[in-house]
Image: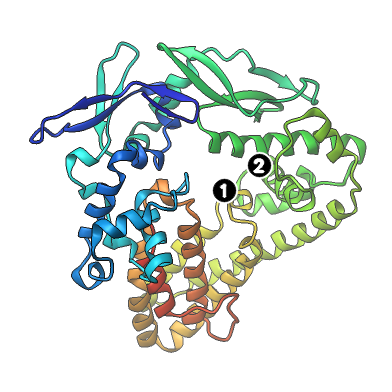
Amino acid sequence: HWSNNGINLPLQYRFEPIHPQDGTTLPVPLALLNQIDTAACDYLIPGLLKEKLIELMRQLPKPLRRQLVPLPDRATEILREPPDPQETIVEYLRRRALQLTRLDIPAGALSSDTLPTHLRLHLQLIDDDGNLLDQHDSAGALQEKWQSEAHEAFSQVDQEIERRDISEWNFGDLPEWVEQGASGHAIRGYPALTVKGSSAAIQVFDNATAALQAHRQGVCWLLARTLRQRQPGILPTRHDLKELALGNADLGTPQELVNDLTQLILVESYDLEPLPRQQQAFASLLALPTTELEQSNLRWMKQLAALTEGRHQLGRQLRKLPINLLDTGQQVQRQLGELVYRGFLTTTPAYWLPHLPRYIEAMQVRLQRAAQNPQKERQQRAQIAPLLARWSDCPATMRDHPDWVEYRWCLEELRVSLFAQPLKTHRSVSLEKIEKMARSLPRE
């Protein structure tokens, strides 16, 4: 049996070296798919870990590989420190090689996809009747392909804890997880306080990360509702954002902007890590002074107004671009759309959000400089193109990985450095540094 994250599933084993299913197979019910820990799949059979590491090291180019020989001894040395539960076997090997030999293995030099068949975990996706829906050696690939169907299958499981029409925290404490039986298996769910129309609700998710994101929104909504009742005007209202919303309809309705800005202000002003799950913890937040909340509200109202004004100025520049700068204009338009969009206030990392106005200003400077020296613009565009393509090709399942997030925002700093040199960068960046970072990015 395989046990992980409260899931207990039977394993199947086939010894048939020429068969594509040679080795271990894990049948996964559709309702459980999104709960499978992709990193844990790499360590399913402890007895094969050494062989896996040896095979991975054999993939390396000779100049790198010879720094790790003899490979069996190196694998034994690596295994003296167990892997972190959240890292894939490739990340584990790279980390330990760096610790033991100072060899920095490029992430692209290794892939568990090319391991011999018997060393890969084969996953079979099955329905409630045990019929085969799909199969793959990558849990991440199955999750990406079947995500919505898995959500739907999970939602059919009866969850007694769920409730609707919540306007105050009067339901006691909210557990981090609950278990229900379905399809002959114990299915773990993750309850969260969510926003449903004009009220809150308790909803059970099949994924802890999704539950955490929803719970943050739900907690902020309930906090804001109570604070507005106690102290009107302390948080943004639709009236405050009505004019801004009219000129920026693509960023959401006035109410959506209010919700997003309110969540941003609450997360910045209050210590919401960890998010409250106990009724008393929520009550303690409401008892805190509101001075910082008021200051944050005023500051972000000004910043949002400045950001949207810069966006409009950039739009006017783009509309006046000469035909020989259309390629530059399209790239700037795409960059702007990746920075400022519906929901950006809550999805942009808090560390980088205050830098958006500078990035917009850098785009304005870029257009001015491109008009003065189109040839230099083309050269710089060609230099950064492979690095931008690396981010564009990032799998959806990896876009929240810390290394990829860092890379994505360092690209913005590099754009400032290349195209708008009069402006200062927040980080010391160069083409060489970002190219090195790109080589070390993890894969699925």
Give amino acid for label 1.
Arg
Task: Name the mark on residue 342.
Answer: 1
Q: Quadrant of residue 144?
A: top left
Q: Quadrant of residue 93?
A: bottom left
Above/below status of 312 relative to 4: below
Coordinates of residue 305 in the picture (x, y in percent): 71, 61
Front one among 353 and 74: 74
Above/below status of 147 relative to 241: above
Q: Residues within 10 Å of mark 1 (few under 14, many from 20)?
A: some
Residue 358 seen in render? yes
- Pointers 1 and 2 in contact (CB under 8 A)? yes
Q: Quadrant of residue 49?
A: top left
Q: Residue at the left extreme? A: 18
Look at 92% across and 41% down and name the residue there. 231
Q: Residues within 10 Å of mark 2 (few under 14, many from 20)?
A: some
Look at 59% across and 82% down and name the residue there. 423
73 sits to left or right of 100? left
Front one among 163 and 74: 74
Instruction: For marks 1 and 2, give the CA distance.
Output: 9 Å
The quarter in which the N terminus is drawn is top left
253 sits to left or right of 74? right
Look at 63% across and 67% down and name the residue there. 355
Give amino acid for label 2.
Glu
Task: Give the residue at mark 2.
Answer: 256
Task: Name the mark on residue 384.
Answer: none
SS category of the residue bearing label 2: helix
Coordinates of residue 50 in the picture (x, y in percent): 29, 48
Residue 393 seen in render? no
Above/below status of 290 relative to 109: above
Coordinates of residue 27 in the picture (x, y in percent): 30, 24
Coordinates of residue 180 in the picture (x, y in percent): 53, 15
SS category of the residue bearing label 1: loop
